[in-house]
Every structure is written in structure tokens, then in C-alpha cells.
């Protein structure tokens, strides 16, 4: 088993997504002692944004890429290799302005690439993901409550976007552990964290 942990909070000290992820990884490793684990911290070390040069290189077939093009794509290639290495993904994803952190978006811009993580059939205008045989677990805290049946449910672009983009590259098995109400009273906040911990304790054995 190979777990890639991707963290995207800009916080280290107070981060709920990081604290819960740490707890989960420790429990998961205890249940899977031979498993391998890597961490990619895009919250603190975001990849570079795509540029014009990058985009030109990206759309050039691999066998026609110059050495300059390969150099421009090299960081993105390393991130893709790391993603393809994993069979399980753990993502720490705080909700930022109803969506995912921009650091995670730039990571996705680097790894969602034609002929690397998806293929495109221009005759049928259809897509197929290449990052198959993986599952993802997402830990996503937020200040408010964005459950589907809540008044803010329609503004939860974090979960809907993540599901869409992971599906797009071939990852269908997605478990989301939301940690809502983090700007409510301490009692409510702690109750939500406890609930997430209970779910994660179980997932450490079964996921
Ligand atoms: C830039 C920014 C934007 C945020 N936007 C939202 C938001 O749209 N909705 C929400 O409920 N919480 C929002 N929050 C609160 C965070 O989701 C919440 O504090 C969460 O716990 C952060 O994750 P972390 O604890 O892992 O750092 C925002 C926080 C930041 C820093």
C-alpha cells in the first residue's frame, strides 16, 4: 500500500486538517505497518503556476518535446510520477472562499495533464482518466456548515469541485470527512472534531 498525503492548509500550528490527517496517518500506519507514506505539502510549498512556455510544452506530443520543454515540465512531471506511484491519497483541504485553497488548485493545474492523467478523444469529445486504481480520502474543515441539506449547501464548491476533478482523472472511490462549524462555539467546534476523529479511527482500519 502506498499513501500520498497532500496538505493544502496555509497553517501549520492551528490547522485542523493537518492535525486530523496526522492522527489518521499514525493510526493507519499502525494497522498497515508495511505501507509506504509520502507527504506533499502544497500549502507551504505550492508548485509554480503554469506559464505560456509550460502550456506550449504541455500540448506538444512527448516525442516532439525539446529539452527546454522537458525542463519546463520537469516539476509537473515529478508531481505526476508521485501521484501515479500512490494507490491511496489523503487530502487535507480547508474550505477557502467556498472552494479549495489556491495552493491546491495550482497543484491540480500541474497534475491534470492531457496524455499523463487523462486522455481526450477529439472525435467523440470524450475524456478518460488515467490515474486509475486509486482511492481518495479528503479531510475538509470549514468555518460554517456546508452539508448538502444545509442553507449553505449550494455554495460548497470545495467538495463538488474535488469530486469532479478526481473523477475526471480516474479516481472514483472518494471518501469525504467534513469538519464543519469551526467558527461556532468551542463546544460545537469540539463536537465536530470528535465526530471526525471517530470516523477517521474507523477508516484507519477499513480504508
Ligand atoms: C482565506 C480563507 C478563506 C476561508 N473561507 C471560508 C469559507 O468560504 N467558508 C468557511 O466556512 N470557512 C472559510 N474559512 C475558514 C477555514 O475553512 C477554517 O478555518 C478551516 O479550519 C481552515 O483549515 P485548517 O484549520 O486546516 O487551516 C476560510 C479561511 C481562510 C484562511
Image (cartoon, grey):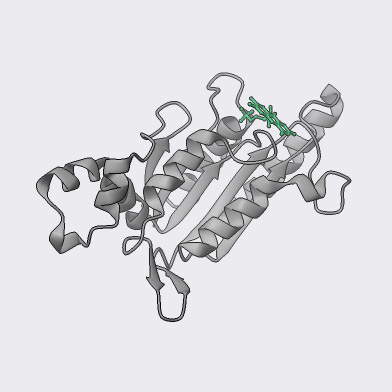
Image coordinates of residue 103 in percent, x first then y, are 49, 34
Q: Which corner quadrant holds the N terminus?
A: bottom left
- Visible in this render: residue 107? yes
Q: 185 or 36: which is nearer to us? A: 185
Image coordinates of residue 117 in percent, x first then y, are 37, 61
Q: 38 or 204: which is nearer to us? A: 38
Q: State which quadrant residue 37 falls in.
A: top left
Image coordinates of residue 91 in percent, x first then y, are 53, 44
Q: Is residue 40 left or right of residue 168?
A: left
Above or below 63: residue 103? above
- The residue most toward the bottom is 124
**Residue located 58% across and 30% down the image:** 19
Above or below 109: residue 63? below
Image coordinates of residue 88 in percent, x first then y, are 45, 55
Image quarter where ligand 1 lies? top right
- The residue most toward the top is 13
**Residue located 62% across and 43% down the image:** 139
Q: Is residue 116 left or right of residue 18?
A: left
Q: Is residue 65 left or right of residue 45?
A: left
Q: 133 or 187: which is nearer to us? A: 133
**Residue located 22% across and 43% down the image:** 74
Amino acid at each position: 500500500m502506498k499513501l500520498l498525503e497532500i496538505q493544502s492548509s496555509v497553517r501549520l500550528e492551528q490547522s485542523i486538517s493537518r492535525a486530523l490527517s496526522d492522527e489518521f496517518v499514525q493510526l493507519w500506519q499502525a494497522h498497515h505497518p508495511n505501507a509506504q507514506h509520502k507527504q506533499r505539502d502544497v500549502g507551504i510549498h505550492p508548485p509554480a503556476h503554469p506559464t505560456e512556455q509550460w502550456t506550449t510544452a504541455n500540448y506538444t506530443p512527448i516525442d516532439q518535446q525539446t529539452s527546454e520543454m522537458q525542463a519546463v515540465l520537469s516539476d509537473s512531471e515529478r508531481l505526476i510520477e508521485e501521484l501515479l506511484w500512490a494507490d491511496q491519497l489523503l487530502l487535507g483541504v480547508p474550505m477557502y472562499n467556498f472552494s479549495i485553497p489556491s495552493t491546491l488548485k495550482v497543484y491540480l493545474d500541474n497534475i491534470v495533464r492531457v496524455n499523463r492523467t487523462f486522455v481526450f478523444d477529439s472525435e467523440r469529445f470524450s475524456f478518460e482518466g488515467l490515474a486509475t486504481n486509486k482511492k481518495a480520502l479528503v479531510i475538509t474543515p470549514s468555518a460554517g456548515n456546508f452539508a448538502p441539506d444545509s442553507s449553505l449547501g449550494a455554495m460548497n464548491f470545495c467538495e463538488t469541485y474535488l469530486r469532479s476533478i478526481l473523477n475526471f482523472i480516474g479516481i472514483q472511490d472518494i471518501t469525504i470527512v467534513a469538519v464543519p462549524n469551526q467558527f461556532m462555539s468551542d463546544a460545537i467546534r469540539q463536537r465536530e472534531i470528535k465526530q471526525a476523529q471517530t470516523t477517521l479511527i474507523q477508516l484507519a482500519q477499513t480504508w
